[in-house]
Image (spheres, grey):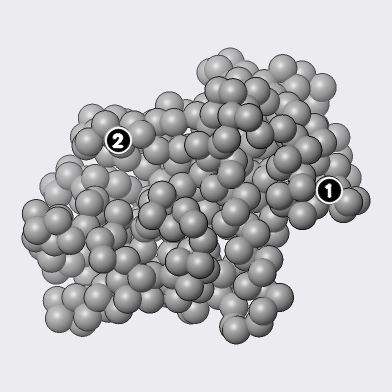
Amino acid sequence: MMNKNMTRRDVLRLSGLAGASLVIGPLLSSFNIETGMLLRKIPMSNQLLPVIGLGTWQTFDVGNSEEESKVLTQVLVEMNRLGGRLIDSSPMYGNSEKVVGDLTQATRFSNDLFYATKVWTSGKEAGMKQMETSFKLMQRDKMDLMQIHNLVDWKIHVKTLKTWKAQGKIKYWGITHYTDSSHNELEKVIKSEQPDFVQFNYSILSRNAEKSLFETIRKYKTATLINRPFEQGNLFRMTKGKEIPTWAKDYDIYSWGQFFLKFILSNELVTCVIPGTSKPHHMIDNMTAGYGKIPDTKTREKMYSYLKKM
């Protein structure tokens, strides 16, 4: 959780952005840091998790550049200082697992984070080998969350993950996908295997999960990670150069990023959203969506209608 005595000037100084030409003043002054980031329970354990995390697809797939490492370290610093904990990666994401491991281990808060990655291969032995490699790359003795990426060979991997959870090697296990067409299959796996987590796509203009997936999640008490909250940047391209509605400020929304993320968080079944970024000021913007007032049902539909009319 963010240091309660930290001022906006402290955040700017520590972020290295105090002199940058970025309109982030409202982003940092729009919430009461005394309250901390919104936390939601993981149903299977009642452990509390901050509602905004970090995805690493593409953004952390970098080489050995000192400059890139410095910037990504600052992204992690901002996440930690503003209350975020969860980092999601995968063997599919190129160099991301190694970069996450190297950079987090160089910080003082590495053991305060919640590490999530995935298995993305076929076969029991190949899956176990790949997951062991992920442990080494991310420099973890125990993984907080191991997920079956895009349901690849899930019937095989689920057995391993249940065993590893029982042995204490992983704390939670889950399943993932990123398309609307996968939601029915995700539901089937939730009903038959009852994973701790399910990760899937959901956004203000991509609401297929509301048809029945969320109801299954509610019934089986599954924690949720939301990917593609900005629809791969399409939402920002759609709103470029346009002002957010004045009434959005009643819900502590001062940017389009906060607008999109707070819509998602207005669904109480969302445990954590994992937008990806490699830019510290975007990390600040994302994190602040976890502070302040959350839109109610009426307002979330108002938000949706406003965007649809653009």
The image shows residue 179 at horizontal and vertical percentages of: 45, 56
Q: Residue 77 in the image: x percent, y percent?
A: 60, 54
Disc assigned to residue 150: none
With 122 as the anchor, is 201 left or right in this view? right
Q: Position of residue 20 (x, y in %)?
A: 87, 53
Which of label 2 and label 1 is nearer to you?
A: 1
CB within 8 Å, label 2 to label 1? no
| Residue 263 appears in the rendering | no
Placement of 192 over or under 215, stated as above or below: below
SS for dot 2: strand
N-term-proximal mark, 2 vs 1: 1
Q: Residues within 10 Å of mark 1 (few under 14, many from 20)?
A: some
Residue 310: image quadrant is: top right
- Which quadrant of the figure has residue 258? top right
Q: Amino acid at mark 1?
A: Ala
Name which residue lies at 48% across and 63% down: 104
Residue drawn at the location 14% of the way across and 76% of the way down: 124
Within-10-Å neighbours for mark 2: few <14, some 14–19, many 20+: few
Q: Which residue is tagged 2?
A: 47
Identified at 9% across, 54% down, the residue is: 166
Q: Which residue in the protein does label 1 denote?
A: 18
Task: Judge whether residue 74 can be spotted in this image.
Answer: yes
